[in-house]
Amino acid sequence: MATEAPESSPKSPRILVFGAGSVGCYVGGRLMSAGADVVMVGRARLRKVFDESPLVLTDYEGFHFETRLAPDTFTEDPAAAADADLVLITVKSAATAEAAEHLAKYLRPGTPVVSLQNGISNAETLRTRLPQTRVLAGMIPFNVLQKSPGNFHHGTEGHLVAEQHPGLEPFLPAFERCGLPFELREDMTAVMWSKLLLNLNNPINALSNVPLLEELSDRNYRLCLALAQQETLGLLKQAGIPTVQLTAIPTPLIPKVMSLPNWLFKRLAQKMLAIDPIARSSMWEDLEAGRPTEVDWINGEVVQLALSQNRKAPVNQRLTELVHDCEQSRRRWAGDELLAELRSASK
């Protein structure tokens, strides 16, 4: 049954989602489902979708919400930021600087801005270009897939995380009410690198061209991920950057668990495999749509970390190259072929 959003209170803070694609529409829609005052700024292609179809949200636990979006709720006009009390940035990493340039024209001084993006450096990019605001690093650990036009599906577990700051506290009840509570932390550098270690699976999933559950059930693909993660953990240790535990498995042990035989992996990583069978990575979705991927802000971050230490990251470098090649050639890789390619690169 279709569900309309409850009316927001006249005194509700206005939350702006800037860069409303799959993740932005999902988070914005969840907030709307609990009565929050939300405006989403996104591309014309989605505006056209919502002119004809409702916004539909679902998740792997059975959540369902459906509503029609008015033109002033989903807009292409960045001037909507002028009334924002909180801004959530969900643009692709390549568009971060451009987003900041648009927002700088309209945001009130002191407005909290949370970067809910992949990668490590987006919050710093925003801080440089939005010095009058309070830019905070954030993280969305779960996967969102656009199942059909206007239908966004949350397929994996996880909760929102953001940098500890008193300016966020007035907004926390809205996220609690909609079922997407924020955890505020002071160790966001460690959190973001730990999330990136998990996101190193994004290019492998994209290159595999199969759902996440099927990919992670294949030991060859898991061994590819373990190679990329082991390389990254070594560089983090050399740089003195700690990790934190974001899953049921301690972060330093994840590559070892990924390397286990299938029967043992399935027994020890049951919670990690609590994935909707249709879930795929956002990088796969970008390749399918013919869009540039964020590989330079995922594996490329590892390559940059290695360069800062006068070292190399051959596995992550090769994955970056393969995804860029796939953006043009559309080639996809079987697990054994990709593993052989990455092992060859690491020699």
Image (cartoon, rainbow, N blue to C red):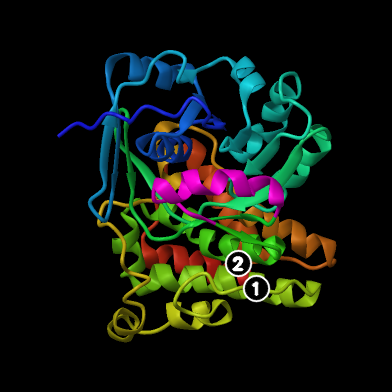
- Residue drawn at x 47%, y 58% is 159
Give the magenta part as a residue range.
Answer: 165-182
- Residue 260 is tagged as none
Residue 312 belongs to the span the image colors magenta: no
Where is residue 199 shown, x and y percent of the image? 53, 58
Residue 253 seen by the camera:
yes
Relative horizontal placement of residue 345, taking residue 176 as reference (left or right): right
Name which of mark 1 and mark 2 comes first in the sequence: 2
Q: Which image quarter is the N terminus in? A: top left
Q: How many marks?
A: 2
- Residue drawn at x 62%, y 18% is 78
Mark 1: amino acid: Thr
- Residue drawn at x 72%, y 29% is 100
- Residue 243 is tagged as 1
Residue extending farthest left: 1
Q: Considering the numbered disc 2 on the image, is that residue within a helix, a strand or a loop?
A: helix
Q: Which image quarter is the C terminus in? A: bottom right
Contact (CB < 8 A) between labels 1 and 2?
A: yes
The residue pinned by badge 2 equals: 194
